[in-house]
Image: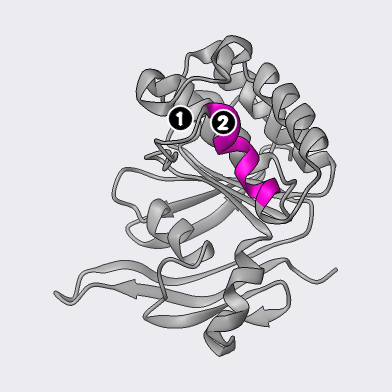
Amino acid sequence: MEPIVSAHNISLSFDQGHNVLRDVNFELLPGSFHFLTGPSGAGKSSLLRMLYLSEKPTGGYIRMFGNRLDDMPKKNLPNVRRRIGVVFQDFRLLKHLSALDNVALPLRLVGGKKKQIIDHVRELLSWVGLDDRMHAFPDSLSGGEQQRVAIARAVVSKPLLLLADEPTGNVDDKMAIRLMRLFEELNKMGTAVLIATHNEQLISKFSHPVMCLDQGRLQTNRDKAA
């Protein structure tokens, strides 16, 4: 089976010579599910930024969906991004759109049918506990509610790859487990999932393998199912 993502000796350095990532190698297979952990400043967010194409490695290269990203023409990058769902730490919701319209946006951009979009989005927002907040705008939502809208938006189009940066950081333990179950359901439908989190207690409740970044290096996977 060909990996959906493979990183080959990727490094990331700042102008001051600080190495954020050093010689990182890993593969993500279609339908796989991994946690990415490590202390603050270990490079988790930097690695995710490279995977959703907002940062380029200063060394090595990444293959995604069978193509090297550094060889890919810029005009092809939007097609790659459309296959990726991203949950950002800062949510990045559009303030002029309601929760429902924020979540519906990825489907509208690809020309989905209006009624099917609305029905699907309503069901998803209900699942994350936002039945009564669908028409609220981001500024009127709590941090935890914004987090759930951002997650719903990331998964609504059933991407081939889901990248989530601390997706449960603003919700209580009960909702964190519920959101993890949503990620698992998406994973069962074929989406590869990579979740960056420092929440070891949350990780311990699931049997998915763990990749650990420490001082810019990726440690050997901890396969918790073993």
Marks 2 and 1 close (CB-CB < 8 Å): yes
Residue 37 coordinates in the image, percent (x, y): 47, 44
Q: Quadrant of residue 68?
A: bottom right
Q: Is residue 106 left or right of residue 188?
A: left
Q: Residue at point 39% right, 36% down?
A: 95
Q: For the N terminus, give its image quadrant.
A: bottom right
Q: Residue at x 40, y 52 (%)?
A: 45
* Furthest residue toward front: 114
- Image coordinates of residue 50 in percent, x first then y, are 46, 66
Label annotation for residue 199 = 1
Residue 94, percent from left and from top:
43, 40
Q: On screen, 67 above or below 109? A: below
| Residue 142 appears in the figure | yes
- For disc 2, the neighbor class at 10 Å (few under 14, some 14 to 19, many from 20) is many
* Residue at point 64%, 48% (across, down): 106
Q: With respect to residue 136, does 185 lie above or below?
A: below
Number of numbered discs overlaid on the protein picture: 2
Q: Estimate how packed mark 1 is, as few (under 14), some (14 to 19) or many (20 or more) residues with alpha carbons within 10 Å.
A: few
Q: Viewed as shown, does residue 122 lie left or right of 170?
A: right
Give the residue type at disc 1. Asn
What residue do we see at 38% from left, 19% from top? 140
Give yes or no for residue 27 being in the magenta stretch.
Answer: no
Could you tell me residue 96's position as x and y percent?
42, 36
Is 107 in the magenta? yes
Q: Of helix, strand and loop, which one carries label 2?
A: helix
Check residue 203 in the rendering and tell me which mark sits there, or answer none: 2
Q: Nearer the viewer, residue 189 or 44?
A: 189
Q: Quadrant of the C terminus?
A: top right
- Predominant secondary structure, magenta span: helix
- Read off the magenta span: 99-108
> 157 and 12: which one is in front?
157
Residue type, label 2:
Ile
